[in-house]
Image (tube, rainbow, N blue to C red):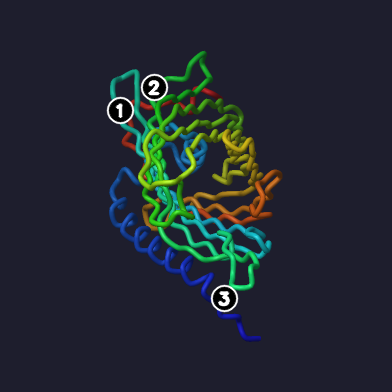
Amino acid sequence: MTTPPSLRRSFCFPTLCLLVSALFLGAGRIHAAGPEAAPAADGGAEDLAKKLSNPVASLISVPFQANWDFGAGPTGGGTKFTLNIQPVVPITLTKDWNLILRTIVPIIDQRGIAPTVNAAGQYQGSSQSGFGDVTQSFFFSPSKPLFGKLILGVGPALLYPTAGNRYLGGGQWAVGPTVVALVQQSGFTLGVLANNLSSFAHSQGNRAPINALFLQPFISYGTKTATTFTVNMESTYDWNNAQWTVPLNLGVSQIVKIGKTPVSFYVGGRYYAEKPVNGPDWGLRFVVTLLFPKKPGVSAPSTVAAK
């Protein structure tokens, strides 16, 4: 069977992104070959899996998150590929406080989604590729859990208008509060991550203002073999249009060592329980995460006290 040219093109950009990611992974492997990269120095793979479930743990991580969404656009046949590069860097401020920087850099290829009108007056989808808008969160987090179990992080979040195409980003600077709260006990991690971004400056004219809530309740269970099962909802509420987008994500991850570098592999799928007009129906996710445990003795939110 001959593959249609449009289908071949739709997988060309994702393949290129994954190849670029592979180069980063190779570089990360060389960089992390020192003693601090070994899981045993930080409590083993099970402890790393537990920290990976905690967004404000003492764990430097670099996830390469590949997402495929299907069933979008004016004809229902549109597809979207998003590679999110999401470095997480914890910084010790004092013995009592830490700052966790979480950055999301999206690289997008979408086909048949953005509505256009052809010569016959019929709606169809066009294609766009490039960077999306970058989101960066700054979580200030106590070095010890509150009330013995509650791990908390609060701070500001910023949206940078880095998208090169009007269909790949909002074209505006936005800012708002962000918070993460969770507890970990008996292998379970239960928590919520949220932010609300509102635009305050335009980088491109004639764009609708941004005012959106992101709400992500999550629950995961980790086994003693460093396998983690995860369920979450990465929900977004558009205040301007009173519209929810609610994808339900289910997945499983496993931590292994490649050389001396601990790496997490995640695979999962999602179903859109609520979506706007022309939104996708379902999707797939594959994540490769490089892990760089901090040296023992560095102050950070404890994930051990919540047994």
Cα gap from disc 3 to disc 1, whole angstroms: 49 Å
Contact flag, marks 1 and 2 (Cβ < 8 Å):
yes
* Residue 54 point in image, percent of width and height: 49, 34
Q: Which residue is mark 3?
A: 6
- The foreground one among 167 and 252 is 167
**As shown in the figure, which amino acid type bears the numbered disc 1?**
Thr
Contact flag, marks 2 and 3 (Cβ < 8 Å):
no
Judged left or right of residue 54, residue 119 is right
Judged left or right of residue 224, residue 106 is left
Where is residue 215, by image quadrant? top right
State whether residue 249 is above or below residue 26. above
Cα gap from disc 2 to disc 3, whole angstroms: 51 Å
| Tag of residue 9 | none
Q: Residues within 10 Å of mark 1 (few under 14, many from 20)?
A: some
**As shown in the figure, which amino acid type bears the numbered disc 2?**
Ser
- The foreground one among 64 and 130 is 130
Where is residue 43, by image quadrant? top left
* Residue 174 point in image, percent of width and height: 41, 36
The secondary structure type at the circle numbered 1 is: strand
**As shown in the figure, which amino acid type bears the numbered disc 3?**
Ser
**Given this view, does label 3 or label 1 mark the residue nearer the observer?**
3
Q: Earlier in the sequence, mark 2 or mark 3?
A: 3
Q: Quadrant of the N terminus?
A: bottom right
Q: Which residue is mark 1?
A: 92
Q: Earlier in the sequence, mark 1 or mark 2?
A: 1
Q: Which residue is mark 2?
A: 143
Q: Residue at x 57, y 41 (%)?
A: 224
Where is residue 225, by image quadrant? top right
The secondary structure type at the circle numbered 2 is: loop
